[in-house]
Amino acid sequence: MKENNELIFLKPVLKERIWGGTRLRTEWGYDSDLPGALGECWAVSCNGQADCEVMGGRYRGRHLSELWKKCPELFGGETKGDFPLLVKIIDAGEDLSVQVHPDDAYAQAHGGGNGKWECWYILDCPEHAELIAGSHATCRDELEQMIREGAWDTLLNRVPIRKGDFLRVDPGTLHAITAGVELLEVQQNSDITYRIYDYGRHQNGKLRELHLSDGVEVTRVPYCITSADVIHTDPQENVPQLLADTPQYRMWTIAVNGTSAPKIKSERFLIGNVLDGNGTIDGMEVRKGMHFIVPGGYMPAQLEGRMRVNLTEPVS
């Protein structure tokens, strides 16, 4: 068997967050010795903050960073730079801070590293839920004034969402996930975040740090996301629905039902996430909460069962 003819299943890394919830334990079945609220599951991660470990097969016990460096054939050939993407499941027990991310050019000019393109696929949310996405400022001077005055209700744009919705959060977009929302986040492999507003919350006895200078500089104005920018997913069963095609990644969702699901293949590699239900991939049992890499050139994989699967292919 060729080295790239084996799916690579990864062990997620869990993160405590001040705003975290309970569902990563109760609904996803993730075990953790962390005592506090779990806010994030870093499902596919390869960086200094979380390096996922392979759960089985010939690479069992090895970390994704090692495979990236030493086994480029798994990823379609030469692997330059950092692993390109980071995939998370986020459970917001409380509102997250209002924040913004830079693009690559700004990030590299201010300390190095990548910027952050990201997107959200809504796994669950309360009735009449909204996300913060963009602002009502008409220019940068107005943005600065409204921040100084704390005019958050006037400044922040809110967009209604429901379960199954998808939206992109491109660099420069003021944004925040709100309480009760559970989502899959796919992003560039970067953790550069400029926090603009945090509801006056304290951590370890101190107000959490804000990053107003950088945050204001990179925020797009005027800019806000509207309902027209939100994709309401309702894909035909067993037919991939393209959600995003950006300079960094392409992303699909598939509602698998039965035995006629499409075969999947990538010349580079794919990241897979089982978001609901259970089934098999080439006869291997999978269930909600399992995350894997389909190596570049892997023989076409057959998805069977009744489950929701997300697939992401890095572009750059």
Image: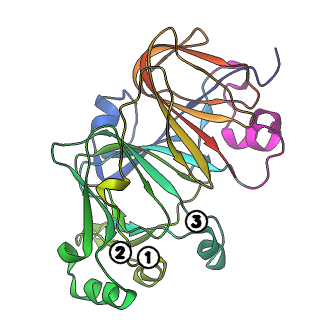
Residue 80 among those drawn in magenta: yes
- Report which residue position mark 1 lands on: 219
Is 255 or 281 nearer to us in this picture? 255
Q: Is residue 45 visible?
A: no
Q: Position of residue 232 (x, y in %)?
A: 34, 41
With respect to residue 113, does 90 lie above or below?
above
13 horizontally vs 34: left or right:
right
| Stretch in magenta | 56-81
User: Given the current orientation, which residue lies at the most extreme left position?
Assistant: 127
Q: CA distance from mark 2 to mark 3?
A: 17 Å
253 horizontally vs 109: left or right:
left
Which amino acid, by three-letter code, is at mark 2?
Ile
* Mark in the foreground, 1 or 3: 1
Report the coloring of the rendering. rainbow
Q: Position of residue 241 (x, y in %)?
A: 48, 34
Quarter the N terminus occupies: top right
Residue 110 circle label: none
- Report which residue position mark 3 lands on: 115
Q: Position of residue 243 (x, y in %)?
A: 48, 42
261 horizontally vs 59: left or right:
left
Residue 145: name its quadrant: bottom left
Residue 107 among those drawn in magenta: no
Q: Position of residue 304 (x, y in %)?
A: 51, 12
Helix or strand or loop: what does disc 3 sit on?
loop
Q: Residue at x 28, y 38 (%)?
A: 163
CB under 8 Å between callouts 2 and 1?
yes
With respect to residue 273, does 195 lie above or below?
below
